[in-house]
Image (tube, rainbow, N blue to C red):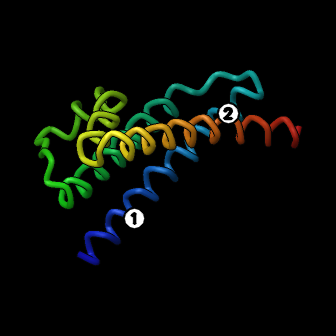
Amino acid sequence: MVGLLSRFRFASVMVLGSVLITQAGRGVFAAKHVELPGPTLAVEYVLIASVIGYWFEVDNRGTRFMHVWDQGWFVCMGFPFLLPYYLIKTRGWRRGASATFAFLVFYIVAFLVGSVLTKIVD
């Protein structure tokens, strides 16, 4: 159980870290009124999908809710809908909704931090 808990924490830190990096980067580009380069979007997409897929895999070992064999396109295309559904089903309405809300707030705040810091520095 200790190994699973440490893997879950690592996967959670990976998800939040990748969201922080990608959204802060987007905030920097938005503050400078510059479009993101094409390869950046592809790298962000693959990074977020990979770490969320890994988080699903690690979390599923603890909850035994569902096992998705196709972690590729299923997670890439459906994670905005799949993540809230999964969290509500495995943690209950209150904890699942609050976790989804916290993720969305973190997503937006990371973008705003990148934008504000860029405006302060420039």
The location of residue 5, given as percent across then percent down, is 31, 70
User: Measured from the top left, where is residue 115 in percent x and y?
Assistant: 74, 35
What residue would you read off at disc 1?
9
* Quarter of the image where the N terminus is located: bottom left
Judge from the rendering whether residue 59 lies leftward or rightward of residue 101; answer left or right. left
Report which residue position mark 2 lands on.
27
Is disc 2 surrounded by few (<14), some (14 to 19) or many (20+) residues within 10 Å?
many
Q: In which quarter of the image is the C terminus?
A: top right
Q: Nearer the viewer, residue 38 or 122?
A: 122
Is 110 on the left or on the right of 102, as rendered? right
SS for dot 1: helix
Count the marks.
2
| Residue name at image x 57 percent, y 46 percent | 20
Spot occupied by residue 105 in the image (x, y as percentages of width and height) = 57, 38
Q: Which of 46 and 75 is in front in this view?
A: 75
Q: Which of marks 1 and 2 is in front?
A: 1
Q: Which amino acid lies under the numbered mark 1 shown in the image of this protein?
A: Arg
Residue at disc 2, secondary structure: helix
Tell me which amino acid carries mark 2: Gly
Residue sitting at 62 percent across and 33 percent down?
A: 26
**CA separation in Å, label 1 and label 2:** 26 Å
54 lies above or below 121: below
**Sequence-first tag of 1 and 2:** 1
